[in-house]
Amino acid sequence: MRRDEVVIDPVYATKRNFTGEPVPGYEAKEVWLDPDVVKKLDTLQEIVRGNLIENGFSTEMANNIHIIVKDGYRPHKATHAMADWAKRNNVSRAYVAANISGHNKGKVLDATLGYRMKDGTIREIWLGSRFDEFNRNSNHGSAGRKLDPRRDNPSSYQGLGYITANRYPITKLRNILKASMKAVGGKSYQGEYWHYSFGGGKCYDHNIN
């Protein structure tokens, strides 16, 4: 089982998100998912590594790449706080839902890739945009943009700073993540390479605290 190797990064419980502040409802600093989605994590990590090797990554490198989960269930108060922020900052509803979504059901998994360094720390791999960048750099099929260390590193996992996989195009890494999610039933969203939906279900409404 590989679920224990999945890295959890509850960005909305920190200042490392698009609002610049912890979002109401994420007080426990955890990521909660519907139990059916949690089961997907048992095989997802292994599928990612298999796809990496099939696409030219060495076994050693593939074994050090981990899924980083950024968000799952979203409390209603968080949805409303994000929508209010988006309205104030003229961000399109294509990126920030104003109403109930799969996130409020725990049926959406937001995830990216990280690399375990020799000192044991996990560094987030630069995939062409920050998480929740809200522009075409985040779209599936986009090659994204170059890393700007001064602007981008603080938003990375635990603020450790991104690393780049220069030998491997960003589109290839994104497609590996997408194919792996599809293999466990995840449906992609064109506008956000990190966003995967696992169907409908019960709409919860409680804080993560």
Image (tube, rainbow, N blue to C red):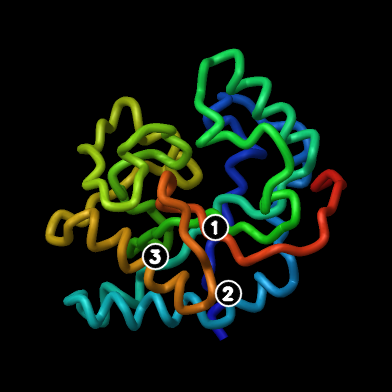
Q: Secondary structure at mark 3?
A: helix
Q: Check the image and report above or below for 206 versus 58.
A: above
Residue type at mark 2 is: Leu
Closer to the chain start, of discs 1 and 3, is 1
Closer to the chain start, of discs 2 and 1, is 2
Q: Provide residue 132's location: percent of width, then percent of height.
A: 47, 38
Q: Check the image and report above or below for 28 versus 87.
A: below
> Residue at label 2?
41
Residue count near mark 3 (Cα–Cα under 10 Å), binned few <14, some 14–19, many ≥20: many
Residue 58: which numbered mark, if any? none
Closer to the chain start, of discs 3 and 2, is 2
**Which quarter of the rendering shows the N terminus?**
bottom right
Q: Quadrant of residue 53?
A: bottom left
| Residue at horizontal 50 percent and vertical 44 percent from the top | 158
Q: Provide residue 4's location: percent of width, then percent of height.
A: 59, 74
> Residue at label 1?
69
Residue count near mark 1 (Cα–Cα under 10 Å), binned few <14, some 14–19, many ≥20: many
Question: In this view, which residue lies farthest toward the right?
Answer: 206
Q: Closer to us: mark 1 or mark 3?
A: 3
Residue 178: which numbered mark, if any? 3
The residue nearer to you, when weighing 169 against 190, is 190
| Residue at horizontal 39 percent and vertical 39 percent from the top | 130
Q: Is there CB contact under 8 Å for labels 2 and 1?
A: yes
Left or right, 138 with respect to 75, comes to left
In 3D space, how far apart are the residues under numbered discs 1 and 3 (Cα atoms)?
Answer: 14 Å
Residue type at mark 3 is: Lys
| Residue at horizontal 23 percent and vertical 50 percent from the top | 164
